[in-house]
């Protein structure tokens, strides 16, 4: 499901939306970490590491949050209507597959 949503965002606006959504949740922490290493700033390294470890921890929904935010940015802020994936339908499809496995 995740890969289908990402493939549906192939347009330039879709890639920009994915980048912006990633930067909102996780990318700024990676930048803090890299800048902190380059300039030997322990505060930036500490904040960047803490946020990255939080999002990589178990039970944190980083990928769904990034995808939902990116789709919102693409549709409503960048006014791109090329994205044909409907999240409600994909969610129902995923639940049906899980119910069949049980």
Image (cartoon, grey):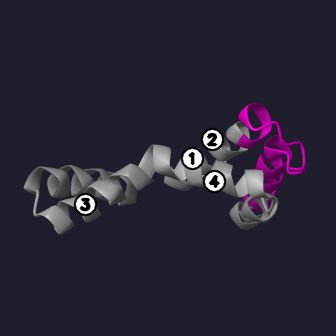
Q: Earlier in the sequence, mark 3 or mark 1?
A: 1
Residue range in magenta is 74-98
Q: Cβ–Cβ below 8 Å for labels 2 and 1? A: yes
Q: How far separated are the C-alphas under marks 2 and 4?
A: 8 Å
Above or below for 3 versus 71: below
Which residue occupies 34% across, 57% down?
A: 31
Q: 10 Å neighbourhood of mark 2: few (<14), some, or many (≥20)?
A: some
Which label is found at residue 21? 1
Q: Is residue 94 visible?
A: yes
Residue matched to label 4: 18
Q: Cβ–Cβ below 8 Å for labels 1 and 4? A: yes
Q: How far separated are the C-alphas under marks 1 and 4?
A: 5 Å
Q: How far separated are the C-alphas under marks 3 and 1?
A: 20 Å
Residue matched to label 2: 69
- Rendered image quadrant of residue 37: bottom left
Q: Earlier in the sequence, mark 2 or mark 4?
A: 4
- Residue 20, position as x, y percentages in the image: 57, 47
Q: Is residue 33 magenta?
A: no
Q: Secondary structure at mark 2?
A: helix
Q: Nearer the viewer, residue 64 or 38?
A: 38
Which residue occupies 78% across, 65% down?
A: 7
């Amino acid at each position: 499901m995740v890969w289908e949503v990402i493939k549906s965002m192939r347009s330039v606006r879709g890639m920009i939306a994915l980048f912006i959504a990633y930067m909102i949740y996780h990318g700024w922490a990676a930048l803090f970490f890299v800048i902190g290493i380059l300039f030997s700033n322990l505060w930036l390294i500490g904040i960047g590491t803490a946020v990255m470890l939080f999002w990589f921890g178990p039970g944190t929904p980083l990928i769904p949050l990034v995808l939902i935010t990116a789709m919102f940015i693409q549709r409503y802020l960048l006014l791109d209507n090329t994205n044909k994936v409907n999240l409600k339908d994909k969610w129902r499809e995923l639940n049906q597959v899980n119910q069949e496995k049980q």
